[in-house]
């Protein structure tokens, strides 16, 4: 199918404008909004709490709320306004009908198979040794990664029902909507228009998606995840499909962490250790079969119809 037209401008100009919009909307405006929320709601020593959130659980929910609002502003509201005000487009053109229950189950199985399949890559990437010539940059990347891990651990430590619900919305719902709108709906479509090759567009937008998270030691598994979401969007022409896949990927992890804290199971989903090779091999076969099924059955919407049909 032809890509959804994001802009009438040259594709290269449109891509630069989108990237500038993301930088301004999320990195600048989103962080400004987040810091305003934190500074208004938190009554203690803010600098001390931000530097050591694990030992200041009272700031955890405030930081989660601020992160959610920042993502909502930077990755949903500002892109929506950009499309409407500057490109005169509506969000409806990127969406078809919401997937039916069988597709929810298929995509859930795909998420689990993908996670097990790429676990050897995740283990390798987490422990990769950067060349000595990277020097201070390599040290910075490792420290940044460690700080990000501490922050995520603080978000998800000792979850209460309220903090679990908040974490679920902030980690699973908002990023699925915002990141898929930006990286698949906008960037992937414009890369496809620029290069005329859907595979280049999918992998390049997946690379931008992974780099956006600024976590080098998880770059490659996230790159593969981004590519899978790119392909299901390309096959379906319906942004709900990668949104649901993204939501299930993040949501299953949050639920699993909460259930582990409740001692329902003992599986550590935060571990970067590879699954045993027999499980990896079985997961690879299952993933290949599910992707083949998606390729054959995720039919793009009828271009002549203003309202694309639901995925049955």
Image: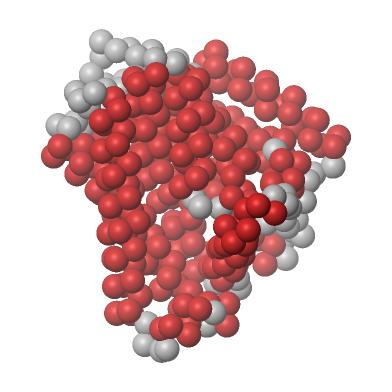
Q: Nearer the viewer, residue 207 or 83?
A: 207
Residue 282 placement: quadrant: top right
At 41% from the left and 73% from the top, the residue drawn is: 62
Left/right placement of residue 226 relative to residue 125 reads left
Q: Quadrant of the N terminus?
A: top left
Q: Indicate whether 153 appears above or below 93.
A: below
Residue located at (79% from left, 35% from top): 280
Residue drawn at point x = 68 percent, y = 22 percent: 288
219 to 229, vertically: above or below: below
Q: Residue furthest bottom?
A: 44
| Above/below status of 7 relative to 261 | above
The answer to whether residue 223 is visible is yes
Residue 122 in the figure: left or right of residue 88:
right
The total number of labels drawn is: 0
Left or right: residue 186 compared with residue 88:
right
Give the quadrant of residue 52. Answer: bottom right
Q: Residue 104's spot in the image, x, y percent?
A: 53, 34
Does the rendering let one see residue 104? no
Q: Colour scheme in the image?
A: secondary structure
User: Where residue 121 sits: x, y (%)?
Assistant: 71, 41
Residue 49 coordinates in the image, percent (x, y): 48, 82
* Residue at 51 percent of width and 52 percent of height: 214
Q: Tell me: residue 141, above or below residue 222.
A: below
Kindly give the residue lying farthest to the front in the view shown.
Answer: 133
């Amino acid at each position: 199918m032809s890509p959804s037209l994001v802009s009438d401008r040259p594709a290269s100009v449109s891509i630069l404008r989108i990237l500038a919009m993301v930088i301004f909307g999320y990195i600048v405006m989103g962080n400004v909004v987040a810091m305003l929320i934190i500074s208004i709601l938190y009554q203690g020593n803010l600098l001390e709490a931000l530097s050591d959130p694990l030992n200041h659980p009272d700031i955890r929910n405030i930081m989660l709320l601020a992160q959610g609002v920042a993502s909502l502003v930077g990755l949903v509201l500002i892109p929506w306004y950009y499309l409407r005000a500057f490109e005169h487009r509506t969000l409806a053109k990127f969406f078809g009908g919401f997937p039916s229950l069988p597709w929810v189950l298929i995509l859930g199985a795909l998420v689990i198979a993908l996670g097990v399949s790429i676990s050897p890559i995740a283990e390798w990437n987490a422990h990769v040794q950067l060349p000595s010539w990277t020097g201070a940059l390599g040290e910075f990347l490792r420290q940044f990664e460690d700080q990000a891990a501490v922050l995520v651990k603080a978000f998800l430590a000792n979850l209460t029902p309220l903090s679990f619900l908040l974490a679920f919305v902030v980690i699973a719902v908002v990023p699925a909507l915002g990141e898929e709108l930006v990286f698949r709906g906008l960037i992937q479509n414009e890369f496809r228009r620029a290069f005329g090759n859907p595979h280049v567009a999918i992998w390049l937008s997946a690379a931008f998606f992974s780099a956006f998270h600024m976590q080098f030691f998880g770059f490659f598994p996230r790159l593969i995840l981004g590519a899978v979401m790119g392909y299901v969007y390309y096959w379906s022409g319906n942004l709900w499909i990668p949104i649901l896949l993204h939501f299930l990927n993040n949501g299953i992890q949050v639920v699993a962490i909460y259930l582990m804290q409740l001692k329902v199971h003992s599986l550590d989903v935060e571990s970067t250790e590879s699954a045993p090779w027999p499980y990896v091999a079985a997961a690879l076969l299952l993933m290949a079969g599910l992707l083949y099924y998606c390729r054959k059955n995720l039919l793009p919407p009828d271009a002549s119809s203003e309202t694309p049909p639901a995925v049955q």
